Image: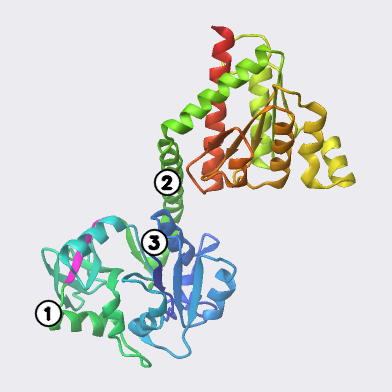
């Protein structure tokens, strides 16, 4: 799901901001506020955003114009919050995640979706519990149902306020009149409640700040360092979870191929053969890592094992690439180094690196045992090797993480055979 972020506000109560930029672009620690909001969305699993811009839209376009995850929609005339949403309708599926671009909260979006689904709501909004709601209009709710919007009350009492984050059914957006200014908060939502449509609330009592007033912006600036650290920790945890999930998808066939490759390596080494490994970029580093573990030691003391990475001789690599072509850098070295009975491992996350494929093809011709470490499906390498170690992922970082895990397991199995 894409997020639709309303970023058209001028920030009239923030003269230090509005003179040069729209309110969501207010400077916070050298970065615009909007970057913090988008970073939280990405940490929550929402990668793409449509920014509905109005006042000084060119500032937003200049800042985010090169980001493929962001699309800026520019109003030609002020359309209000609902009118801007109507403009974004072509980018909305069954429902839209909508955010005000001048407030920050960190609700659980899965919980928001659960409440929305279970209530069968037309709109579900995040309702923030505030110990002092005097700055805001209050919400009156019965359970998860929104009953009414109440005007500001200067009394410093606790209450529920609108957190500016909504799940909205497409049908609601389709009914917004096109071509004129319409307010989502003052027209659309009260109109839905009056018509008997289900407007639900998802209660949230975590951090919230509205930067539309000087004291709110100052408070967010003071909290930004902690927010950034928390966001980055969540991103780390998200990356870890994704990496673990890929490893948990390894099946018995993949594991058995790692075991079989270790057995073929042991057989080759015992018969006087060697292990030859190669790849490009990060895979070149993995090739060197595997060779180093075998020549040195992985975990236990033993005799060195014959292994070489074809990525370490820069003179050979550059001479071959210069005199022939880059696609030949491993083929030429395989011709020099590989004999019948050796084990040759080509590493390519896509499975389609031409120089790796050529190296594997020649190794096969020389009756070496060939293996390929790849990503999901194996690409062209699937038919170019004897043993395919295909990681069940299409993400290059996740594949490379699994490659080094598989390599460690492989080296451990080989070493155990020689120690025990």
Viewer-nearest of discs 2 and 3 = 2
Q: Decide: marks 2, 3 in contact (CB < 8 A)?
A: no
Residue at which label 3 appears: 219
The kind of secondary structure element at disc 1 is loop
C-alpha span from label 1 to label 2: 40 Å
Indicate how the structure is coloured in the image.
Answer: rainbow
47 magenta-colored? no
- Inspect the magenta stretch and tell me whether residue 202 lies in it: yes
Q: Secondary structure at mark 3?
A: helix
- Quadrant of the rendered image containing residue 40: bottom left
Determine whether, in the image, residue 331 is placed left or right of residue 213. right
Q: Residue at x 85, y 36 (%)?
A: 316
- Whether residue 63 is situated above or below residue 253 in the rendered picture: below
What x and y, as percent, mark residue 139? 18, 71
Residue named by callout 1 = 196
Q: Residues within 10 Å of mark 1 (few under 14, many from 20)?
A: few
Tell me the quarter of the image containing the N terminus: bottom left
């Amino acid at each position: 799901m894409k997020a639709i972020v309303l970023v058209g506000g001028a920030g009239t109560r923030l003269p230090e901001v509005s003179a040069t930029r729209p309110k969501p672009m207010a400077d916070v620690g050298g970065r615009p506020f909007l970057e913090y909001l988008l970073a939280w969305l990405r940490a929550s699993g929402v990668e793409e955003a449509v920014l509905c811009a109005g006042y000084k839209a060119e500032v937003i376009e200049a800042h985010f114009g090169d980001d493929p995850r962001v699309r800026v929609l520019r109003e030609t005339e002020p359309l209000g919050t609902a009118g801007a949403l109507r403009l974004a309708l072509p980018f909305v599926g069954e429902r839209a995640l909508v955010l005000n671009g001048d407030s920050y909260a960190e609700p659980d979006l899965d919980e928001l979706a659960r409440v929305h689904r279970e209530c069968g709501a037309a709109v579900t909004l995040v309702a923030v519990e505030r110990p002092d709601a005097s700055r805001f209009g209050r919400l009156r709710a019965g359970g998860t149902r929104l009953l009414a919007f109440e005007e500001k009350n200067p009394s410093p009492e606790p209450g529920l306020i609108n957190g500016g984050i909504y799940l909205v059914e497409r049908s609601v957006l389709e009914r917004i009149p096109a071509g004129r200014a319409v307010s989502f908060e003052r027209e659309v939502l009260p109109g839905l409640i009056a018509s008997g449509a289900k407007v639900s609330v998802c209660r949230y009592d975590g951090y919230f700040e509205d930067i539309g007033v000087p004291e709110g912006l100052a408070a967010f600036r003071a909290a930004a360092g902690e927010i950034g650290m928390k966001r980055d920790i969540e991103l780390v945890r998200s990356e870890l979870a994704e990496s673990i999930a890929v490893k948990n998808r390894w099946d018995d066939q993949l594991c058995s191929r790692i075991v079989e490759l270790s057995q073929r390596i042991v057989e080759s080494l015992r018969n006087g053969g060697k292990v030859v490994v190669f790849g490009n970029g990060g895979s070149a580093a993995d090739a060197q890592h595997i060779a180093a573990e075998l020549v040195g030691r992985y975990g236990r003391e033993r005799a060195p094992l014959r292994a070489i990475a074809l990525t370490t001789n820069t003179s050979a690599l550059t001479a071959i690439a210069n005199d022939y072509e880059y696609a030949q850098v491993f083929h030429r070295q395989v011709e020099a180094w590989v004999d019948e009975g050796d084990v040759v491992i080509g590493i390519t996350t896509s499975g389609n690196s031409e120089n790796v494929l050529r190296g594997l093809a020649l190794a096969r011709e020389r009756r070496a045992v060939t293996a390929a470490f790849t990503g999901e499906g194996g690409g062209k390498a699937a038919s170019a090797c004897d043993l395919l170690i295909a990681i069940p992922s299409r993400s290059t970082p996740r594949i490379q993480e699994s490659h080094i895990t598989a390599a460690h397991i492989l080296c451990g199995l080989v070493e155990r055979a020689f120690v025990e």
